[in-house]
Amino acid sequence: MTLDGKVPGGPLESKWERHKFEMKLINPANRRKYTVIVVGTGLAGASAAASLGELGYNVLAFTILDSPRRSHSIAAQGGINAAKNYKNDGDSVYRLFYDTIKGGDFRAREANVHRLAEVSVNIIDQCVAQGVPFAREYGGLLSNRSFGGAQVSRTFYARGQTGQQLLLGAYGALMRQVHIGQVKMFARREMLDLVIVNGQARGIITRNLVSGEIERHAADAVLLCTGGYGNVFFLSTNAGNSNVTAAWRCAKRGAFFGNPCFTQIHPTCIPVTGDYQAKLTLMSESLRNDGRVWVPKQPGDKRAPRQIPESERDYFLERKYPSFGNLVPRDVASRNAKAVCDDGRGVGTTGLAVYLDFADAIQRLGENTIRERYGNLFDMYAKITSEDPYNVPMRIYPAVHYTMGGLWVDYDLMSNIPGLFVLGEANFSDHGANRLGASALMQGLADGYFVIPYTLANYLASTSLPAVNTGHDSFNEAAAAVQQHIDRLFKVNGKETVTELHRRLGKVMWNKVGMARNETGLNEALHQARELRDEFWSNVKVPGEKNNVNKNLELALRVADYMEFGELMTADALHRTESCGGHFREESQTDEGEAKRDDERFSYVAAWEFKGVGQPAELHKEPLRFESVHPSQRSYK
């Protein structure tokens, strides 16, 4: 089956403006009768809830945290892209669109990416109006810097705290709507199921993380804004609470999951130090503006970095990619870092690290300038490693960071389940097989501020929505299924901790479904993931009480979903025998070791339909058509 005809074919310059005009269907006076659920209050969720509240909808907003301000969005440090051409260096909407399509290795939908580039300009104005303290030039104009995958300066930033500052702007707008009663906030709730009535998404089942109570909430539409699934690898840069549960429960209700194997490995992370580490720490990609990446030329060279002369250093990104240098896209930088470490030239005690050196920048610009640009990042690195990056090069290594896959959506951001809209990192739509740096914040705010207000209105105005309450049979069935799932976990009463089983799954995924993948390893990963799932349900130990605060139960519910989702993710990687972006199949590479696409056989979105635990998912294909760009072998030389 294909998904042909579900989305527009290409990005006409006027498409989005015409689309908005055609969708002004809903009478503002009638909006108050509609109730909308927003799950997740990161940038996508907070901006969507604030916008819809401002428009007059009754919004129910859910967060697993005690406050939206603690969302993982605050970890996006480096900046947000917008095609404003403030540096007069040739940037444009088309150039941002092209860089994003190329960076995603021609596996993104043209129309969505063009719309994203168009609205990027408005996002900055919106955030400035909210008081976001972007960096400014001496004369008062907003400052820009470069990010990976671009040769222009289009990234707006607030030191190394851009995500946090943008979230505070959205949070302020959201809390204004809470104060006036348009948005009702439900903190410390986790979505555990989607309720479908007559084929439409009409509500959710949540667990109150304080009382343990299973709760029901009805609405006319559901917006899923719950982020990515990188923690399936156990170690990642994601916050510990980030998980796949809400998206996976929707998939088990029939929502297609698009491109689950497309995972981004970020090149600039603090390396792993031991087997019992809980998570990894991201060092912003913005550091690659002034930091130079290098390793010793000779394998096994264990001298201190300052004792290695320039003639014996290999600035391998600058050598291999002279046009982009240290600002190549993340997938390219990560694979090259892995390659030099595999060659025996990695640094540090583990040999799984490369240097990110600021000595040249400090000498050229002065230490004060570097402190102004990256001071909080340098302080964070020093606290974690007890090393001073002003005097000693940082040690970095790739780590799981962002997921380009997610629930499949059409151009209106609606899944194949009517009434279920998916925003931000939870959907698959804008980044193809590799996300350019500073594009995640752009997508989250574009979806929340500038897309969903129009597309949701179009759906509500053109759809028959019979009255539904939480006593409906569909709510009874979903709530009973959630309770049965929880009861089953406690009945196992085995000997293995949830964390240990999660760690073992993560090692399988990282070693065989990580930076480099091959047929043998993926088949082994499928077999091992199934064995781990069986062991989980026969030997897991979940202490504590069902109906109370229970972090062990929260984690167990999420890991149970990872056990199932990891199998789908591996199957997707196995079926896609090409290499593209972050999905690198060792059997498909150029003579120079770069990713080699197979456009003839794989120029499509792989949308998977769940068919049951342990059963092969059914593949649906959305063909990708390119009208404005011509797919070509990526080159950053």
Image (cartoon, grey):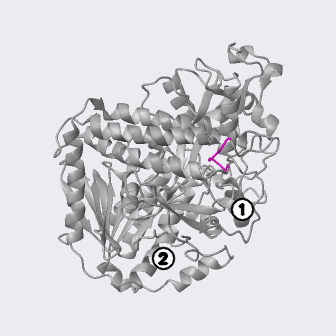
- The question of residue 585 being in magenta is answered with yes
- The question of residue 174 being in magenta is answered with no
Q: In this view, does 609 lie above or below 520?
A: below
Main secondary structure along the magenta-highlighted residues: loop
| Nearer-the-camera pick, 437 or 70 | 437
- Tell me: 382 left or right of 593: left
Q: For the residues carrying marks 2 and 1, which lies nearer the camera in this image?
A: 1
> How many labels, in total?
2
Residue at image mark 2: 454
The residue depicted at 24 percent of the width and 37 percent of the height is: 542
| Nearer-the-camera pick, 451 or 421 | 421
Q: Can residue 235 be seen in this view?
A: no
Residue type at mark 2: give it: Tyr
Residue at image mark 1: 600
| Quadrant where the C terminus is found in the figure | top right
The residue depicted at 55 percent of the width and 75 percent of the height is: 6
User: What crowding class fits label 1: few (fewer than 14 Cα within 10 Å), some (14-19), or many (20 or more)?
Assistant: few
Between marks 2 and 1, how big is the CA–CA gap?
35 Å
Q: Is residue 14 visible?
A: yes
The residue depicted at 31 percent of the width and 56 percent of the height is: 191
- Tell me: 579 left or right of 241: right
Element class at badge 2: helix
| Quadrant where the N terminus is found in the figure | bottom right
| Nearer-the-camera pick, 634 or 94 | 634
Give the magenta part as a residue range: 579-586
User: What crowding class fits label 2: few (fewer than 14 Cα within 10 Å), some (14-19), or many (20 or more)?
Assistant: many
